Amino acid sequence: NASSIGLVVGSYALASIASRVLVTPLSRRFTPWQLLIISGCIAGICFAGFALVHSFALLTAFSFWLGLGLGMATPMSQALLYDTAPANRVGEVMGLRILMGNSVQTLVPLVSGAIGTAFGMGPIFWALAVTQFSTSYAVRAQWRRRKAHPPGPSP
């Protein structure tokens, strides 16, 4: 019913707000790279589990954990983009980030609807989980490359 859906969505929103509050103390302990990797792994686990959940309480818990993971991703990705972009091109990089985000918000529901109609919801959640884990792996590889070969000063 509608109130159950509201509780699930509300748990996601509450966790998203909580993660934004917790990001400052966590950033004192972890690098933005590490927090982004953790965020992606949390989201990947949640997406993989969503397809298997049949209980309202478990769905609400997964939604809360997804909010923690994804709520932390935006500030960390923006911090990394700002830190790694050339000084005279930060605006362009942030603009591209917004473009990509809006494109994903348009394309994912369209593709998910087509896949969900053909195959059910399981493959959608599993594809999202694979995407999150792959992204976390790519972020980890980039972080290690930057640790091994730090970039020089910007011209």
Image (tube, rainbow, N blue to C red):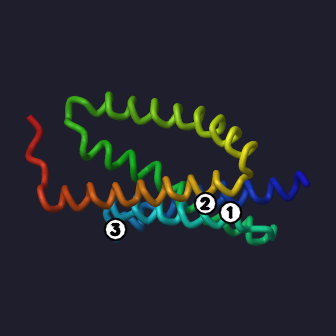
- What secondary structure is found at the residue carrying circle 2? helix
For label 1, the crowd category at 10 Å Cα-Cα, with few meaning under 14, some 14 to 19 and many 20 or more, is many
Camera-side residue of 17 and 123:
123
Residue identified by numbered label 1? 50
For label 3, the crowd category at 10 Å Cα-Cα, with few meaning under 14, some 14 to 19 and many 20 or more, is few
- Residue at 53% x, 37% y is 104
- Residue at 32% x, 28% y is 92
| Amino acid carrying mark 1 in the image | Phe
Q: What label sits on residue 30 in the rendered view?
A: 3
- Residue at 70% x, 40% y is 113
| Amino acid carrying mark 3 in the image | Phe
Q: Nearer the viewer, mark 2 or mark 3?
A: 2
Quadrant location, the N terminus: bottom right
Mark pair 1, 2: CA separation = 5 Å
- What secondary structure is found at the residue carrying circle 1? helix
- Residue at 65% x, 34% y is 110
**Are dots 1 and 2 in contact, CB under 8 Å?**
yes
Residue 76 pos. (x, y %): 40, 53
Q: Looking at the image, is 29 positioned above or below residue 143?
A: below
